[in-house]
């Protein structure tokens, strides 16, 4: 005997009303989730002393698919995954699905200097991104992703020959450095395919956050005053990123996709402040002075390009290159070259940042029917090389080398085989001559929900 479920509307207006009600509920739930993530503020953490320079460590803004491929993204075009790095890719989203991608990570970092080593652990909630179709050949995405992270706490000891009191026996200063904060993005983007195989897109973001960096100096001589410096800023601004992709079939089984991106650089409208507190060690009386650099922070113009080559819907290989023009920006610093130090915007503090990425994704059998579980798993590999965007005392900061590998594991049930669990492992080395070397082992976990929320169920 054959039995079927029947979902046939009594009237077209009733069916339309039900669909609109469902979409409103789904969008409402999605918006509530994204707002919950946004209310967390900075969503990623770090313990690197290098984050004290510039506006901190620049975050990896790729999602589940790209992280296993070393951050490959500009030429990535996949209807089953969100790719925020190139908004032109949104136009590839399937008309029947809603994609929701969330990611977390944890890492162990080894810090090495002068033969001494120390390990530290961190964990963070990284991103929440949704993608859906608006109209034929028009896709949209929205979400919350990190932009930069600041987090460190360490101290140094400076030995000196003599202090102002005249004493000279093993005198020293203990300098404590600490900082926290960073910037996040809440974005909305559209991708449009105006002509066949060619797409353009844009992300408009609300960029917000704050940071606090302190230096506290205490002398071994109790007759010498102590000094504390706090650098701070609060940002509420915008960010605009543009993208384009051209995807061309090559023969019957292959496809080449070329992508380009550009980010608009501008001042953030944030005043960078410096508060100096001097404390008399004998009387404990403190005096403070505050200085600021009006509109002192900026983000740079960014340019990038890349490609992916898809063979038989099974093997994807590609490469990316990006350039961030930090070197053309000034940055607020204390100018010690004058008789009286001045807090002002200075040139030569930042430098252009270059990044090269190689990546691959391989699924043995793209079609799921009649194949084993491991034939449906995505296997991903990638590597990247990045130059620093800042100088340390006039010397180039640490370069970064990263290698990653990961899996995309399908979660299959009776009505869906497109939701996936994405796990990747990443090794990152940051090093520069005469500075701390960092080796990090990072685990990224992303869950990509890909549900047929907009399908019309109808059985005769």
Image: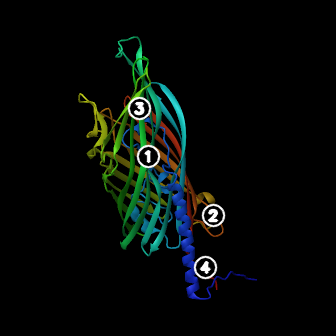
| Mark 2 or mark 4, earlier in chain | 2
Q: Nearer the viewer, mark 2 or mark 4?
A: 4
Placement of 98 over or under 226, stated as above or below = below
The 10 Å Cα crowd at callout 4, few under 14, some 14 to 19, many 20 or more, is: few
Examine the rendering and report whether any part of residue 452 can be seen. no
Query: Quick one: SS at disc 4?
Result: loop
Q: Are marks 3 and 2 in contact (CB under 8 Å)?
A: no
Q: The C terminus lies in which quarter of the figure?
A: bottom right
Left or right relative to 326: residue 13: right
Mark found first going from the N terminus, 3 or 2: 3
* Separation of marks 1 and 3 at Cα, in angstroms: 18 Å
Q: Earlier in the sequence, mark 1 or mark 3?
A: 1
Residue that badge 1 annotates: 182
- Would residue 369 appear left or right of 239 to someone viewing this image? right
Label 4, on which residue?
457
Residue 142: x %, y % from top left: 46, 62
**Spatial separation of the CA atoms under disc 3 and disc 4:** 63 Å
- Measured in 3D between alpha carbons, the distance from the residue under mark 2 to the one under mark 4, in whole angstroms, is 20 Å
Label 1 to label 2, Cα distance in Å? 38 Å
Please report whichever mark, 1 or 4, sits nearer to the chain's N-terminal start.
1
Which label sits in the foreground, 3 or 4?
3
- The spot of residue 166 in percent (x, y) is 35, 12
Residue receiving disc 3: 215
Image spot of residue 303 (x, y percent): 32, 54
Query: Which residue shows up at 56% across the image and 81% down it?
Result: 17
Crowding at label 3, few (<14), some or many (≥20) Cα neighbours within 10 Å?
some
Q: Which residue is mark 2?
A: 412
Foreground residue among 401 and 342: 342
Question: In terms of depth relative to the viewer, which is nearer, 328 or 432?
Answer: 328
Instruction: Indicate how the structure is coloured in the image.
Output: rainbow
Return the residue nearer the eye: 353 or 412. 353
- Looking at the rendered image, the disc whose residue lies closer to the viewer, 3 or 2, is 3
């Amino acid at each position: 005997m054959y039995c079927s479920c029947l979902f046939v509307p009594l009237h077209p207006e009733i069916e339309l009303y039900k669909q609109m009600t469902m979409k409103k509920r789904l969008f409402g739930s999605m918006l509530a989730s994204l707002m919950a993530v946004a209310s967390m503020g900075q969503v990623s953490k770090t313990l690197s002393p290098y984050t004290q320079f510039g506006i901190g460590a620049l975050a990896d803004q790729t999602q589940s698919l790209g992280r296993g491929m070393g951050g490959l993204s500009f030429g990535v075009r996949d209807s089953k995954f969100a790719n925020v790095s190139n908004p032109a890719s949104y136009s590839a989203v399937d008309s029947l699905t809603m994609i929701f991608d969330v990611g977390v990570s944890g890492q162990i970092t080894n810090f090495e200097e002068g033969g001494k080593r120390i390990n530290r652990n961190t964990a963070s909630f990284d991103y929440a991104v949704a993608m859906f179709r608006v109209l034929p050949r028009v896709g949209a995405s929205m979400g919350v992703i990190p932009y930069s992270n600041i987090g460190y706490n360490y101290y140094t000891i400076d030995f000196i020959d003599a202090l102002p009191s005249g004493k000279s026996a093993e005198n020293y200063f203990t300098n404590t450095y600490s900082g926290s904060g960073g910037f996040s993005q809440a974005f909305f983007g559209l991708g449009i395919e105006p002509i066949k195989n060619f797409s353009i897109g844009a992300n408009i973001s609300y960029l917000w956050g704050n940071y606090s960096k302190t230096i506290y100096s205490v002398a071994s001589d109790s007759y010498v005053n102590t000094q504390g410096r706090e650098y701070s800023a609060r940002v509420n601004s915008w960010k605009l990123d543009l993208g384009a992709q051209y995807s061309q079939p090559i023969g019957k089984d292959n496809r080449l996709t070329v992508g380009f991106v550009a980010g608009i650089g501008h001042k953030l409208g944030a005043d960078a402040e410096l508060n100096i507190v001097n404390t008399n060690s004998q009387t404990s009386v403190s005096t403070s002075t505050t200085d600021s650099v009006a509109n002192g922070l900026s983000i740079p113009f960014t340019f990038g390009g890349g490609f992916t080559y898809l063979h038989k819907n099974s093997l994807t290989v590609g490469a990316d290159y990006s350039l961030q023009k930090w070197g053309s920006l000034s940055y607020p610093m204390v100018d010690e070259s004058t008789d009286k130090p001045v807090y002002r915007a200075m040139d030569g503090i930042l430098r252009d940042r270059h990044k090269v990425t190689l990546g691959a994704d391989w699924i043995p059998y793209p079609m799921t029917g009649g194949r084993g579980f491991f034939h449906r798993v995505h296997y991903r590999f990638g590597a990247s090389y990045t130059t620093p965007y800042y100088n340390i005392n006039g010397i180039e900061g640490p370069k970064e080398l990263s290698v990653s590998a990961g899996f995309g594991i399908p979660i299959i049930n009776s009505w869906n085989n497109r939701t996936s669990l994405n796990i990747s492992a990443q090794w990152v080395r940051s090093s520069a001559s005469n500075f701390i070397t960092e080796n990090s082992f990072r685990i990224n976990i992303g869950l990509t929900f890909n549900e047929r929320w907009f399908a019309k169920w109808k059985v005769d």
